[in-house]
Structure formats: C-alpha cells, structure tokens
C-alpha cells in the first residue's frame, strides 16, 4: 500500500439537521434549491455560535435568529435519484428553528463558578433541557414528548377489584390476623358479648346476644373454640363471595339469552350461544362449590 493511500483522508460521514424557517423565507429557500442556482451559497448562510445552540441564518440578505433544538426522536433521511430506489443518508436528531423577531446575538451563559462535580453535572443537565424540543416535525405531533413519552400511569382498579384487593389484604395481613385473635380473646374474657352480621344494603341479617350460633362464648373459652369460631367466620365469608360471583354469572347468562332472542344473524347467534354455554358451565361449578361450603358450614355448626 502506497504512502498516499495511507495518508488519504476518509470520506466524511454526512451530518444533517432540519432547517425550519418562517413561511416566506422557507418558500424563498425552496425556490433557490429547485432552481439549482450556483450562487445559493451567497443567498443562504448559516453561522453557528460557539455554544452550538444558537445561530444566525441569512436568507437573501435577511438575518434570522436560529436555535438548534433536540427532537424527541431520530428521523431517517433518504435520498433518491429515480423516485423508486431510496438510500438512507443520515439519522436526523436536531432542528434549527429560525425566527425573524429573535435575538441575533444572545448573551453567552456564564460558566458555573462552583468546582463541585455534582453542581457542574446539574448545570449541564439544565442547559440540555433548554435545548429540548417538545414537539414533532408535523402538526399532529404537537406536545408529543409529553403525550408519547409520559410516565406510565398505574391502572386505577374498579370497585370489584378494590373489594378483591382489600379482602386479600385483610386475609394475608398478619396485623389483621393478630387483631382478630386479640378481639376473640377479649370476647372470651368478657362477661357478656353481643354481635351482629350486617348485609351490604345495611339490613341486619343475624343478631345474637352472648353467643354465636352453635357456640357458647364463655370466660373459659380455649384456643380450640377460638379457632373453631374463626373457621366458621371464614367459611361464611367464602359463601358470601361465591354467592356474589354466582349472581354475576347468572346476570351475564341472562344477558346472553336476551341477545340470542333479539339477534337474527346466525353467526352472532352461534357466538352468543357458545358464550352462554361457557357461562352455564361456570354457573354449575360455582353452584357445586357453594353447596360444598354450605354443607361444610353445617358440619361445623353441629360440632
């Protein structure tokens, strides 16, 4: 390999940015480019400042203030000679925004007097934020940095999910279990007790003075009876849940039946029928589980 080949300067990679001009100046530059005029360099000049963020753009002897901003994402630039085959030439990540009423020579920012690396990094981040462009390059992408790249929001659970979460937390939380044991122990030591079960609509379903059905609460209640009572309460809670879910499935099944009666399209009827069959299977399973829990509760109460 010859020396001249060793000293040969490699081809410079093409760097590109978007030039955004006011409407009248943009049309003038577009006409200059289409005319392929030789003196385009004299009619269009770009002078970047040392901070690489500000510039003075001259279009046909009219000076415009420009600011180099960072786009929300990279945009590919393509070239073509026959409008059929396209070649990628660069990744564009910056845009030079020009205005006629801007400051042509903004005062340079004073360097940070502090030598603390944390302060220096903070100042650099603030300078970078000033050069961030929050929009895209087309009108539909206005505020795209806030809309597209915003922080992911947590899904707000509905009422049903909130009830399931709260019931799970109450079941799994050791503090709640400890509090239940304390209350049962205090009930066992009390001279007399009174308890009641209130339905969701606010009506009293069961009310008792001094004892739970099938169990006598006395001052000498042992740990076996306490665990027995807690087991009964847990079964009753499960029965309430199963009844609620069974009621929901029955409502959905009734809705599917109504749709089958109303719809005339055979395909839709078949679809609704398959959904109805699935719901009927679920209803059967829930019924079996509910009957099993009720029998279990009766056995506990007879002990």
Image (cartoon, rainbow, N blue to C red):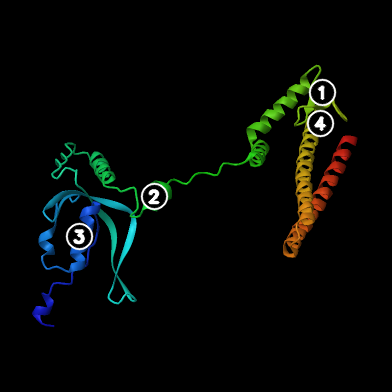
Nearer the viewer's eye, disc 1 or disc 2? 2
Residue at which label 4 appears = 225
Residue at which label 2 appears = 144
Q: Is residue 270 left or right of residue 159?
A: right
Residue 276: horizontal and vertical position, in percent? 77, 56
Q: SS of the residue at dot 4?
A: helix
The answer to which of 142 and 121 lies nearer the viewer is 142
The answer to which of 278 and 182 lies nearer the viewer is 278
Tag 4 near tag 3, CB within 8 Å? no
Residue 253: horizontal and vertical position, in percent? 78, 51
Residue 117: horizontal and vertical position, in percent? 23, 42
Residue at 78% over, 56% down = 260
Question: Could you tell me which quadrant the C terminus lies in?
Answer: top right
- Label 4 crowd bin: few (<14), some (14–19), many (20+), radius 10 Å: some
Residue at which label 1 appears = 220
Question: Could you tell me which quadrant the N terminus lies in?
Answer: bottom left
Spatial distance from mark 4 to mark 2, Cα to Cα?
64 Å
């Amino acid at each position: 390999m010859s020396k001249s080949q060793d000293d040969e300067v490699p081809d410079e990679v093409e760097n590109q940015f978007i030039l955004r001009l006011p409407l009248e100046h943009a049309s003038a530059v577009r006409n200059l480019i289409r005319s392929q005029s030789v003196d385009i360099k004299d009619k269009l000049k770009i002078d970047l400042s040392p901070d690489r963020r500000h510039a003075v753009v001259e279009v046909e002897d009219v000076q415009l203030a420009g600011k180099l901003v960072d786009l929300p994402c990279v945009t590919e630039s393509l070239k073509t000679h026959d409008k059929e085959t396209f070649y990628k030439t660069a990744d564009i990540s910056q845009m030079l925004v020009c205005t006629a009423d801007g400051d042509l020579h903004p005062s340079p920012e004073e360097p940070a007097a502090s030598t603390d690396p944390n302060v220096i990094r903070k100042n650099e981040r603030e300078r970078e934020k000033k050069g961030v462009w929050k929009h895209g390059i087309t009108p539909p992408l206005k505020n795209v940095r806030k809309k597209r790249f915003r922080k992911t929001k947590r899904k707000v659970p509905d009422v049903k999910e909130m009830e399931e979460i709260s019931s799970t937390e109450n079941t799994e939380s050791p503090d709640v279990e400890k509090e239940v044991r304390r209350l049962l122990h205090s009930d066992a030591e009390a001279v007399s007790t009174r308890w009641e079960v209130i339905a969701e609509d606010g009506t009293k379903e069961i009310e008792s003075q001094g004892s739970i059905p099938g169990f006598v609460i006395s001052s000498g209640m042992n740990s076996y009876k306490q665990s027995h009572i807690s087991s009964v309460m847990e079964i009753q809670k499960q029965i309430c849940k199963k009844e609620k879910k069974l009621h929901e499935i029955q409502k959905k099944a009734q809705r599917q039946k109504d749709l089958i009666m109303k719809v005339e399209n055979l395909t839709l009827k078949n679809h609704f029928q398959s959904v109805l069959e699935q719901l009927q299977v679920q209803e059967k399973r829930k019924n079996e589980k509910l009957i099993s829990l009720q029998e279990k509760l009766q056995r506990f109460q007879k002990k």
